[in-house]
């Protein structure tokens, strides 16, 4: 009877394991959709336009403050490119992609805001 009980337990375990396996939902990726091409293009264009305008203003006015800002703000384009590279990386975790997308959108927003602020500084469009 011990053999029969052991065999029965083995069968029950195997059936239970099979039943659980059949109920498992396929693993869903909670990774967000990639930032769209139009959004990427508009964001990149906005940041490049801001940096170009800032640097042209710095050259025209010749002030140290504007020169320093021109030098430093070039990093915005690099930051955007890095964030988009994480968004494109298929091995990046969902959390990393969420953070990269938030960073990319934050950089884009700052480029637009700071470009508008150049009007108050008398920089030509």
Image (cartoon, rainbow, N blue to C red):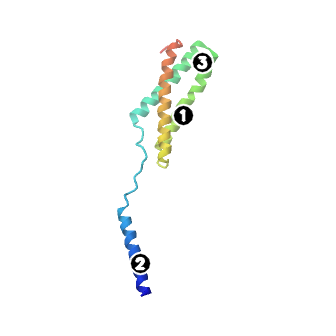
Q: Residue at x 53, y 31 (%)?
A: 77
As rendered, which of 86 and 41 lies closer to the eye?
A: 86
Q: Which residue is mark 1?
A: 79
Residue 9 shows which numbered tag? 2
As rendered, which of 91 and 41 lies closer to the eye?
A: 91
Position of the N terminus by quadrant: bottom left
As rendered, which of 88 and 20 lies closer to the eye?
A: 20
Rendered position, 43 above or below 58: below
Q: Which residue is mark 3?
A: 66
* Residue 59: quarter of image: top right
Percent x, y of residue 88: 46, 43
Q: Residue at x 43, y 46 (%)?
A: 31
Q: Residue at x 42, y 48 (%)?
A: 30
10 Å neighbourhood of mark 2: few (<14), some, or many (≥20)?
few
Q: Nearer the viewer, mark 2 or mark 1?
A: 2
10 Å neighbourhood of mark 3: few (<14), some, or many (≥20)?
some
Q: Residue furthest bottom?
A: 1
* Residue 68: quarter of image: top right
Label 2 with label 3: CB-CB less than 8 Å: no
Q: Residue at x 54, y 34 (%)?
A: 79
Q: Nearer the viewer, mark 2 or mark 3?
A: 2
Mark 1 residue element: helix
As rendered, which of 100 and 53 lies closer to the eye?
A: 100
Q: Residue furthest right?
A: 64
Percent x, y of residue 23: 35, 62
């Amino acid at each position: 009877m011990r053999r029969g009980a052991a065999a029965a337990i083995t069968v029950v375990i195997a059936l239970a394991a099979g039943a659980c396996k059949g109920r498992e939902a396929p693993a869903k990726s909670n990774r967000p959709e990639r930032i769209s091409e139009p959004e990427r293009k508009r964001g990149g264009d906005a940041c490049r336009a801001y940096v170009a305008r800032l640097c042209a203003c710095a050259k025209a006015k010749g002030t140290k403050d504007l020169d320093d800002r021109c030098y430093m703000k070039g990093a915005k384009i690099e930051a955007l490119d890095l964030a988009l590279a994480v968004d494109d990386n298929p091995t990046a975790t969902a959390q990393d992609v969420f953070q990269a997308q938030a960073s990319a959108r934050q950089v884009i927003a700052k480029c637009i805001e700071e470009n508008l602020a150049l009007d108050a500084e008398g920089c030509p469009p």
